[in-house]
Image (cartoon, helix red, strand yellow):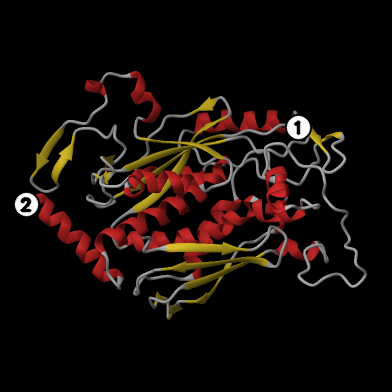
Amino acid sequence: MSRLRYLTAGESHGPGLTAIVEGCPAGVTLEAASIDADLRRRQGGYGRGDRQKIERDAVRIMAGVRHGRTTGAPVALFVANRDAENWGDILAVEPPVSGETTEDAVVIPRPGHADLGGALLYGLDDIRDVIERASARETAAKVACGAVAKRILAALGCVVASHVVAIGAEKADTGMTPEDIDTVEADPVRCRDAEAGRRMMAAIDAASAAGDTLGGVVEVLAFGYPPGVGTFVQGDRRLQSRLAAAALSVPAIKGVEFGLGFAAATLPGSRVHDPLGYDAERGYVRSGNHAGGIEGGISTGETIVLRAAMKPIATLRQPLGSVELSTHRAVDSRFERSDVCAVPAAGVVLEAVVAIALADAALDRFGGATVGELAAAAEDFRRRSRER
């Protein structure tokens, strides 16, 4: 059972996004500014569309925090949609007085989106209901919740970061250190290799000129996460199972790997598994980290390394073929305002959901009604593990 969980509500062009984080221990230092910093990071990145010129995301903490610290009660967050004022009564809660809205029903599904599946699932004649909730705008709420989880992890000495390692066919080296974070954040595509970043931007420009879109790969790392979290006894409680599910909850993510990942399948075991050793200060250590910080479903104390593949954005300026609802008439897909590439922003969202999963797993393992109790239990386990 999850100790830390979150729910989000809201539509892309409605009044705003609401989120509730339940299970946050008391005593976590939390201010709106720390959440806003991640919201701004999500809005950046080369290849984003016009929506980011309108929104200036900032959170309102509505409950669960007093005088800059969490109280143990559910944390309620709200992020307003500034673009809502441009949508009139299209998303009004109450029925329109005239019986009509200012937008005709959307009946042409876009290939690659939730449009058709959602319309069929809920028996809709207007795809607008699907478009609004399935939109990646919802990830702003995920990022706000993730910022709360990051503050919990900070008490454990853990920092979650990410960087872009591929956009389209352009690639950069994997692996980063905490010292690389500032370099990554200063780069327009959040790549720590400036030359690779320039090639990625050129690829985005070429895709934009062609009316196309690009996906890519993001690497997420958790530095300083405690050992002994997770278990091998049930598949859904393995740490990598929880992290993979979290990463795949992000729109457009189609694949996840840890450590060497798929490359491990091409190598002999002697080049895959990490030899063990012992250090008087650190305890049991590994001479490498091919496992990505998780062995047998349990964190090892090494850096957790996860990579996630994002497909190209499905909304194209050069339309693909589609079929009109009800008439089944062959038509071109419609264009809904979108980005050319959102891989840099996806890294920030992936940080958020990974942080939530890691904080949840740590609370599940070490417990604690307060963040101080959580940190003390984790440190006690580290000490006892060094002595075994």
Instruction: State the separation of the CA atoms marked 1 and 2.
Output: 60 Å
For mark 2, what is the residue? 387
Label disc, if present, on residue 211 of the rendered structure: 1
Q: Residue 314 is drawn in which quadrant?
A: top right
Is 382 on the left-hand or right-hand side of 102?
A: left
Looking at the image, the residue that sits furthest to the bottom is 67
Q: Is residue 58 above or below residue 310?
A: below
If the image is split into quadrants, where does the N terminus sit?
Answer: bottom left
Using the rendered image of the protein, determine whether residue 49 is visible from the camera's viewpoint: no
From the top left corner, tell me how far across and down residue 348 is, in percent.
Answer: 50, 49
For the residue marked with disc 1, what is the amino acid? Answer: Gly
Q: Nearer the viewer, residue 317 or 90?
A: 90
Helix, strand or loop at mark 2: helix
Pointer 2 local density, CA inside 10 Å: few below 14, some 14–19, many at least 20: few
Mark 1, secondary structure of its residue: loop
Does residue 101 appear anywhere in the picture? yes
Compared to residue 242, the image places residue 195 above or below, namely above
Residue drawn at x 36%, y 59% as measured from the top left: 360
Q: Residue 213 is drawn in which quadrant? A: top right
Front in this rendered view, residue 211 or 100: 100
